[in-house]
Image (cartoon, grey):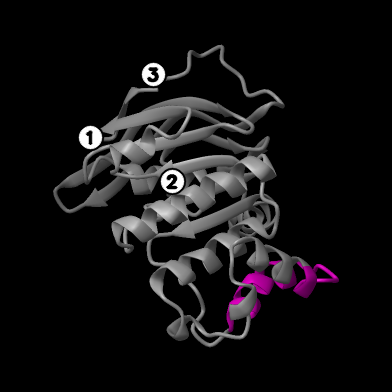
Amino acid sequence: MADSPGTHANQRDALHVERLGKRVPLPSGDLTILDGVGFTIPRGEAVAIVGASGSGKSTLLSLLAGLDVPSDGEVRLDGEPLSRLDEDGRARVRGEKVGFVFQSFQLLPSLTALENVMLPLELRGDDDAEGPARAILGQVGLAERLGHYPRQLSGGEQQRVALARAFVTRPSVLFADEPTGNLDTRTGQAIIELLFKLNREAGTTLVLVTHDEHLAARCSRVLRLDSGRLVSA
């Protein structure tokens, strides 16, 4: 359901989306990927975004995180109007407020597990990156794997490193895009349990894109997309 014209973001909102649209120009005319999407996610809520392939899930996630800009409408992340910021401004907001977990792990192969987790803290300019990185790698069960490179880790271990990297900055909002897509069922289940555990402990707002209805049901709310429109929220 789209927000009414009188709906405004408030300070308790992690994400506030109004009349969001995304179009891509093609030789045959504009392709509409998202059309008039609107919703609000209070801080601390866990929300799943579901829909068929091509429904606009990944595009919506990119807009919510400020990785892309909309054709219409507005996204406010923790009060920041992403749609009005330039690329540097959006990057600043992501560095301060956002964590990411991807299907493909996105670890840097030339860095150890510890170095991968330290990286966002170093980029942010923290004085101590190693201490928090060691601590959270211990939390995810990888205290004995700090010096291992991604190629020396299993898929499940790599995703644990990715979770540690996402949470080490204590983000306001965590975006997870099909976080178990490259894992077998048993390993994926363990990663999901860890994700929700870390999320509860940190009080983070979780936005999870998934095609798995059982996983979506673990969240407190489900946003369902169909052909670029929000059909249930």
The residue wearing badge 3 is 1
- Give yes or no for contact between labels 2 and 1 (Cβ–Cβ under 8 Å): no
Q: Which residues are magenta?
A: 112-131
Judge the density around disc 2: few (<14), some (14-19), many (≥20) Cα neighbours within 10 Å: some
Asked which secondary structure carries label 2, the reply is: helix
What amino acid is at disc 3? Answer: Met
Residue at x 48%, y 28% (from the top left corner): 220
Amino acid type shown at disc 1: Ser
Residue at (81, 67) in percent of width and height: 126
Q: Which residue is mark 2?
A: 61
Q: Earlier in the sequence, mark 3 or mark 2?
A: 3
Q: What mark, if any, has residue 188 been given in the picture?
A: none
Residue labelled with disc 1 = 227
Q: Answer yes or no: do the residues labelled 3 and 1 have beta carbons within 8 Å?
A: no
Q: Amino acid at mark 2?
A: Leu
- Give the CA separation, mark 3 to mark 1: 14 Å
Extreme residue toward the right, this view: 127
Magenta: predominant secondary structure element? Answer: helix
Q: Position of residue 196 (x, y in %)?
A: 53, 44
Q: Nearer the viewer, residue 229 or 13?
A: 13
